[in-house]
Amino acid sequence: MQGKYVIGLTGNIATGKSLVLRMLKELGAYTIDADDLVHVLMRRGGPLYDRIVAEFGREILDEDGQIDRRKLGNIVFADRQALAHLERITHPIVIQTAQELIARALANIVAVEAIKLIESGMADQYDAIWVVTANKEAQLSRLMSKRKLSEAQARLRIEAQPPQEEKVRRAQVVIDNSGDVLETWKAVQRHFAAVQRAAAAAQTSRPTAEAAAPSAPGMAAPAPQIRRARRADLEAMARLWAHAMRVPIVPTAADMMERFFSKGYFVACAGQQLLGMVGLRAENLIATVDDCIVYSAELWPEVGQALLEVVEREARHLSCEVILLFAHQDSKAEAIETFEKNGYRKTSTSDLPRMWRQAAEEYLSQGAILWVKKLLERQIMKPI
């Protein structure tokens, strides 16, 4: 398609499609999440908003006039005909938007994640179908822990979908993501290499940062260089995290892989030394930031400042409306001063607009404090 090799990535709910998509991105593919596209396209002023409201009624709106996905989900997941009708509305516009993004992609390998990749007809246009599977116990656990659904709600969503075997029959590649993330990563690497990526992997011959021990407290740090984290950084990132959290146990390789592929990380380096890191996730025009860590308090004015600047630049590039930053409740005075200097304000989730509040509640962990920075005065009405 347009001189590109396009992988269609699919699987049933909570099998780990997004995890595999991030792995493909790490390997060099340009990635498109069709579910994120739907959420943006159905925002007020977007091309799907009026039709969905007209079909399902204003009862699905929240107090801000946006479509409440939980209310809409409660309707369509309980009624197969309603779900099919919603898909007839959304699929054509999502397919068209995905085609435009594929055409504009600079990478020669593109991965498109869509839960209804096959049913919508998207798969017919792509070079290969990859299906991610997981056992029902793993699906239930993920829906209940990550999406905060009750067991009944989780089962309803799982049972509303066709059996996984129907997708597997169409697949050229099947990735079992029921267990260890390290095994999933090895499988993705192996299959991606077979897709002709060995040559492009050489392109990824980015220098491996064998991170040395971080600067000792009180030591003057050279000007930090900020870059995207690499897999070679994971061991040093784990040590930095353990040091910052004051815990004696360093996270395992599997723990760090899970973090690494759940969001994008930036690291601050001075030569071979890892001085700080920050994790960024952008979904539905909302940026969430956590693991914002520097090695010692006196590094916050320089290293912390540089990390926040990169996060904001990336969030603006992704057209995000707001940054929700989750900082440790015991953050040092230097960290708090840096947050405030950059326009972040400590906020309660109850004071946020509905969509921002849902994102904050999903990712706010125990012992974290929410800081908010609004990037746009008015919410975006349509995707860019």
Image: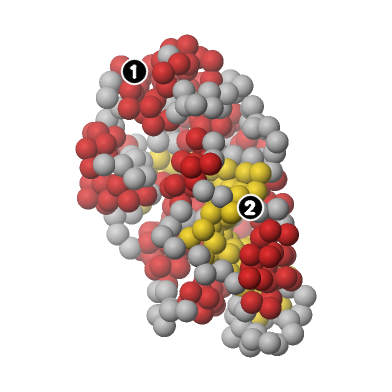
In the image, residue 122 sits, relative to residue 247, either above or below, namely: above
The residue shown at (51%, 58%) is 369
Q: What is the spatial separation of the Cα atoms under label 1 and label 2, in whole angstroms?
A: 41 Å
Would residue 194 be visible to someone looking at this image? no
Q: Give the residue at mark 2.
A: 345
Question: Residue 243 placed where, x, y %?
Answer: 51, 79
Residue, far top: 54
Give the side of residue 288 with respect to residue 105, left or right. left
* Kind of element beneath mark 2: strand
The residue shown at (39%, 68%) is 254
In the image, residue 98 sits, relative to residue 367, either above or below, namely: above
* Kind of element beneath mark 1: helix
Q: On the image, which quarter does residue 320 sit in?
A: top right
Question: Residue 279 placed where, x, y %?
Answer: 56, 60
Mark 1: few/some/many CA within 10 Å (<14, 14-19, 20+): some
Sequence-first tag of 1 and 2: 1
Mark 2: few/some/many CA within 10 Å (<14, 14-19, 20+): some
Mark 1 touches mark 2? (CB < 8 Å): no
Q: On the image, which quarter does residue 47 sit in?
A: top right
Type of the residue with mark 2: Arg
Give the side of residue 346 with respect to residue 312, left or right. left
The residue shown at (50%, 35%) is 354
Residue 175 image label: none
Q: On the image, which quarter does residue 128 sit in?
A: top left
The image quadrant where one finds the N terminus is top right
Residue, far right: 223
Q: Give the residue at mark 1.
A: 82
Q: Nearer the viewer, residue 122 or 74?
A: 74
Depth check, mark 1 against mark 2: the one in front is 2
Question: Residue 103 placed where, x, y %?
Answer: 65, 35
Type of the residue with mark 1: Ala
